[in-house]
Amino acid sequence: MTDMNIIDTIGNTPLVRVNRVLTPEAKANNVRILIKLEMQNPGGSIKDRIAKNMLEDAERSGTLKPGMTVVEYTSGNTGIGIAMICAAKGYKCIICMPQLPPFEERYIVCRMFGADVHLTAPALGMPGLKSYTEDLVEKNEGYFLVNQFFNEANPSIHYTTTGPEIWEQSGENVDYFITGVGTGGTATGTGKYLCEKNPNCKVICVEPTESRVHLGAAHTPHTILGIGAGVPTHFLTELAPGQPFAEGSRGLVSEFLSASSSESIEWATKLAKTEGIMVGPSSGATLKVAMDLAERPEAKGKTIVVIAASHGIRYTAHPLWKEMKQEAKTALPQPPNMSKDKGTLFWDSSEA
C-alpha cells in the first residue's frame, strides 16, 4: 500500500555504467563512464525536477495560489514537466513554445496533460518567445510565470537532489561531470555539489557546435532540442559576472565543449544500439563529449558522469528518427496489403 502521488516519484533516477558504446581509445584508457538516466522521471526528463521545485517553492512563498494559471516559455521538456504537475495539483497551465515541426510530441503531450499551448514565430527565436510570454503574464491578473531561466529554485533542486544522488550512486567518485546547457541550472546546481565533495571534479558544459554562445560565438540554427537557446544563460553568466564569454573556464565550469547536430544523432543512435539506452539528441551530444574526454591522456582511469536528460521516444518528429520513419513507412504501407495468396512474410527489416 502506498500514499505516493505521481509528483512524489520524481528523482532518484538510476546511474548506470556503459561499456559497449565506448571507443577503443576510451576502453584502452580504462575510463568508467556512468550515465544518469533522467528519462526515468515520470514526465520523461530531468526537467521534472525543476518543474516540481519551482512550483512548490512558489506555493510555499505564496506567489502561486489555488485558482491561478501557471505559464512558462520552453523548448519543451520543462513545459511537459510543468503541465504534468499542474494536472496533478489542479492548476490551469499555458505552455509557450516555438511553432516548429520537431516540437510535435511536446505539443501533444502538453495538451494531453490538459495544458493550453501557445506557439510563437520561430524566426523571432528565444527572445521573441520570452517577450510574448512575459507580455501575456503582465496583461492577465492571476497568471504566474515560472521563469525557469532565472528562477533560483531551478539550480537549487539539482544541488539538493541530483548532485547527492550522483555522488552516492557513483561510490563517491566523480572526476568529470558532463551536462548540456539548457538553462544552466543542472550545471551550476549539480556542479556546485560535486565540486564541494571533490574539489578536483571538472564540470563540463556542452553546447551545439552551431551555437557556442558561451564562448562568445554567434548562434546559428541547430537541431539539438533542449540546449543551445542562442543566448548566454543567466546562471552561467552569474558564475563570473562581468567576465566576457570566451575560451576557458568560468567559475566552477572547467570547459565549454560541443557536439554538432549530426554528431548528437550519431551518438544517441549508437547508445541505443549498443547499450539498449534510448536518449534524445542532447544526450547524444553529452555522450559524444564524454567520448572526447575519455580519450584524453589525463582521463586515464577516471570516472565520467554524463546526464541523459530525456528519452529518445519523445523525438519521433526530430531528424533523430528520420531513417527509421522512412523505413517504417515502406514496411507498413497504408492501406495495408490484405492479400491472402502472396505468402506469409511480407517484410524482413534485415533486407531493407
Image: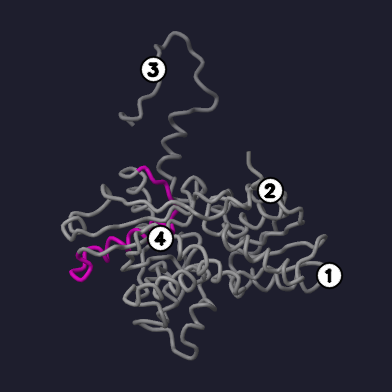
Of the pair 7 and 180, the residue shown nearer to us:
7
Closer to the N terminus: mark 3 or mark 1?
Answer: 1
In space, the residues marked 3 and 1 are separated at their CA atoms by: 62 Å
In space, the residues marked 2 and 4 are separated at their CA atoms by: 33 Å
Query: What residue lies at 44% left-to-right and 88% top-to-bottom?
Result: 244
Query: What residue lies at 71% left-to-right and 73% top-to-bottom?
Result: 134
Q: Residues within 10 Å of mark 1 (few under 14, many from 20)?
A: few
Q: Quadrant of residue 209?
A: bottom left
Q: Amino acid at mark 1?
A: Glu
Is there CB contact under 8 Å for labels 1 and 2? no
Closer to the N terminus: mark 2 or mark 3?
Answer: 2
Report the label total.
4
Q: Amino acid at mark 4?
A: Glu
Q: Which residue is mark 4?
A: 168
Q: Which mark is residue 345?
A: 3
In space, the residues marked 3 and 4 are separated at their CA atoms by: 50 Å
Q: Which residue is mark 1?
A: 141
306 with respect to 315 (left or right): left
Query: What residue lies at 45% left-to-right and 70% top-to-bottom?
Result: 187
Question: Residue 20's x, y, as percent?
Answer: 26, 47
Of the pair 23 and 331, the residue shown nearer to us:
23
| Secondary structure type for disc 4 | helix
Q: Nearer the viewer, mark 1 or mark 4?
A: 4
Span of residues in magenta: 276-300
1 versus 107 height, above or below: above
Q: Find the residue positioned furthest to the front.
A: 1
Residue 131: within the magenta? no
